[in-house]
Structure formats: structure tokens, C-alpha cells
Image (tube, rainbow, N blue to C red):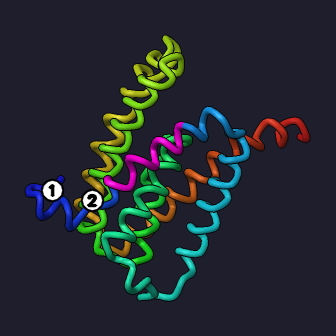
Amino acid sequence: MPKSWKAFWEGPGFCILGGVPGAFLGIWMLSHLPAEQLMKIFGILLVLYSIYSVFKPAGAKLRGFASPVTGTIVGFIGGAIGGFTAFPGAAVVVWTSLRDLPKAQSRAIVQPYIFMSQIFSLILIALLHPNYLSYGYWMLLAITLPAVLPGTATGVMLYRRISDVNFKRVSYLLLGLSGLALLVKIYGPLLAGLL
């Protein structure tokens, strides 16, 4: 997490600034657009990006996309995606990856962004759609916490031990698996019915 305002604005600040209005759009999309279609598109994009990342030439990176304006736009896109998928970090992970940032710099942007986006989105949902936070939601949260906490501790331990290259590989793998999980959620019952 940033330790000063200067570090905040040099790191996740503009992404978070863009993520706030983006979350409003994402919550609106969650309530008004067909969720299945949005998840299909998002899942396909994640899988395709992961495949591209694995096979892209070493050292290939975007140049000139490190400005506050770009960070705000990426944050907005992430906020919108996070509002309807609860996965706000994808856009920011892709952005930091395309810029070929070292793992420490990438994490210093992505981690605070995800943390703030999740909190803000939950507050928005509680205010705009309190029925989403039903008893079932809180039960699922309680059931998943025992898996999330050790998973987080394992992730932090691995982060400290792996190189920048392996960090990127793991990030691509996890992005691809996330996209694949969305597609399996949608197409899994159809495939099971065919078998």
C-alpha cells in the first residue's frame, strides 16, 4: 500500500479515481444488462489475452501509456468490469502487464486498486441494491473465508519467492483460469447435457 500521497498518485491513485465512476456503471450494468452475455465477452477476452501474453515476444510492451489520463481510463474500465463481475483488477493487471512493469511496481498499483474497488462496490450495492446482500450472500461469504485467508497467505509467500518473469506467468495463468471459469459457469451445463 502507498505510504505517502506522492506514492499514491504515482501508483494506484488515478486508477482508483477512474474506478469510482466506473463502479457506478458496472453496478448499473449488473442490474440492467444480461449478465450471461457480459460474462461470456469478459471470459473470452481474458482467455485470449492470457494466450497472447504467453506467446508475445519477450520485452514487448506498450510505450506512452503511463499518463494519469490513461490510468484514470483503465481504472474506469476496471471499475465497470468489477461492478458486474466482482473482478475489478483484470483491466489494471492487463495494463501493468502491457507496460511490462516489475512485479513490485505492478502489485503496488493493482493491490490497492482492487481493495478500494471492492469496498466501494460493496458500499454502492448496499446503498442501491440492498436486496443483493441477502442472507444467502453472507452465508456464502462466511463459507469462502476459510479458503480465502490461507489462499491469500500462500499467495503472499509465493510472491516473495518468485522472479518477475514467473510472477507474470502466474498472473497470465490466473487471468486465463478466471476467464475459463466464467465460460465453464455459462457453458458447463450445456456441455454436461451433451455428454
Name the secondary structure under disc 2: loop
Camera-nearest residue between 69 and 8: 69
User: Percent x, y for residue 143?
Assistant: 44, 21
* Residue 58 lies in the magenta-colored region: no
Camera-nearest residue between 14 and 173: 14
User: Height in image: 76 above or below 139?
Assistant: below
Amino acid type indicated by mark 2: Pro
Residue ID for mark 2: 12
User: Taking 33 as reference, is 155 left or right?
Assistant: left
> In the rendered structure, which segment of residues is drawn in magenta?
16-27
User: Percent x, y for residue 43?
Assistant: 64, 53
Name the secondary structure under disc 1: loop
Q: Residue furthest left?
A: 4
Amino acid type indicated by mark 1: Pro
User: Height in image: 133 above or below 167?
Assistant: above
User: Percent x, y for residue 27?
Assistant: 52, 37
The quadrant in which the C terminus is found is top right
Q: Main secondary structure of the magenta part?
A: helix
Which label number is shown at residue 186? none
- The part of the image, by quadrant, that contains residue 169 is bottom left
Label 1, label 2: how far apart the Cα atoms are: 8 Å
Is label 1 in contact with label 2 (beta carbons under 8 Å)? yes
Q: Residue at x 83, y 43 (%)?
A: 191
Q: Residue at x 37, y 62 (%)?
A: 72
Q: Earlier in the sequence, mark 1 or mark 2?
A: 1
Residue ID for mark 1: 2
